[in-house]
Image: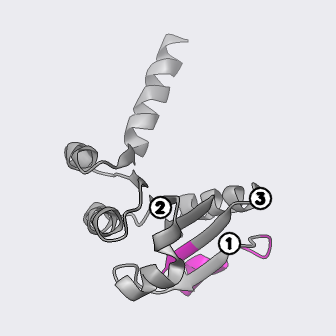
């Protein structure tokens, strides 16, 4: 699969590494060179140091052929804008977004994004730990 990851924080680094090991074509976009360097020498995908709000950057990343776009910027509003561009302008079918605010989950769902909220995952695990 051709996968683009926007945001190279801790989760982005881990995800990019795993997908790269699984032989997917992975492109990671982040404005911070220090973040991209954390991918390490074993990462065999492409990195782009740039602002993902720039349509030319998205085109350079190959967004027109992306099977999946992961939005992991740490900023819900930025993720929403980039996700809408990906869906409407570039027709990316699968957009997976890390959402931080409980109050914005419904907005992301209504836009057709697959959402992951770490807080919900933690809450589920805490409940599970209480029961067991």
**Quick check: 111 above or below 44?**
above
Q: Report if the CB atoms under discs 3 and 2 are less than 8 Å apart.
A: no
Separation of marks 3 and 1 at Cα, in angstroms: 12 Å
Q: Nearer the viewer, mark 3 or mark 1?
A: 3
Q: Residues within 10 Å of mark 1 (few under 14, many from 20)?
A: many
Choose between 12 and 81: the one closer to the eye. 81
The answer to whether residue 32 of the structure is visible from this angle is: no
Q: Which label's residue is closer to the chain start, 3 or 1?
A: 3
> What is the magenta range?
28-42
**Quick check: 36 above or below 98?**
below
Choose between 39 and 96: the one closer to the eye. 96
Residue at left offset 25%, top offset 65%: 77
* Among the 4 quarters of the image, the one containing residue 51: bottom left
Residue, disc 1: 39
**Quick check: 49 above or below 104?**
below
Q: Residues within 10 Å of mark 3 (few under 14, many from 20)?
A: some
Residue at left offset 49%, top offset 28%: 125
Q: Which label's residue is closer to the chain start, 3 or 2?
A: 3
Residue 61, magenta (yes or no)? no
Residue 62 in the image: x percent, y percent?
Answer: 52, 76
Q: Which label's residue is closer to the chain start, 1 or 2?
A: 1
Q: Residues within 10 Å of mark 2 (few under 14, many from 20)?
A: many
Residue 78 in the image: x percent, y percent?
Answer: 29, 69
| Quadrant location, the N terminus | bottom right
Residue, disc 3: 21
Q: Nearer the viewer, mark 1 or mark 2?
A: 2
Q: Report if the CB atoms under discs 3 and 1 are less than 8 Å apart.
A: no
Dot label at residue 69: 2
Choose between 23 and 90: the one closer to the eye. 90
Residue 74 in the image: x percent, y percent?
Answer: 38, 63
């Amino acid at each position: 699969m051709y996968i683009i990851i926007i945001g190279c924080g801790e989760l982005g680094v881990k995800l990019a590494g795993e997908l790269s090991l699984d032989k997917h074509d992975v492109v990671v976009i982040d404005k911070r060179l220090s973040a991209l360097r954390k991918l390490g020498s074993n990462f065999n995908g492409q990195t782009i140091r740039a602002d993902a709000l720039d349509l030319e950057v998205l085109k350079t990343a190959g967004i027109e052929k992306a099977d999946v776009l992961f939005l992991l910027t740490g900023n819900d509003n930025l993720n929403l804008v980039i996700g809408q561009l990906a869906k409407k302008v570039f027709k990316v079918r699968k957009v997976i977004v890390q959402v931080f605010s409980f109050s914005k989950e419904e907005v992301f769902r209504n836009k057709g994004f697959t959402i992951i909220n770490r807080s919900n995952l933690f809450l589920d695990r805490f409940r599970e730990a209480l029961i067991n």
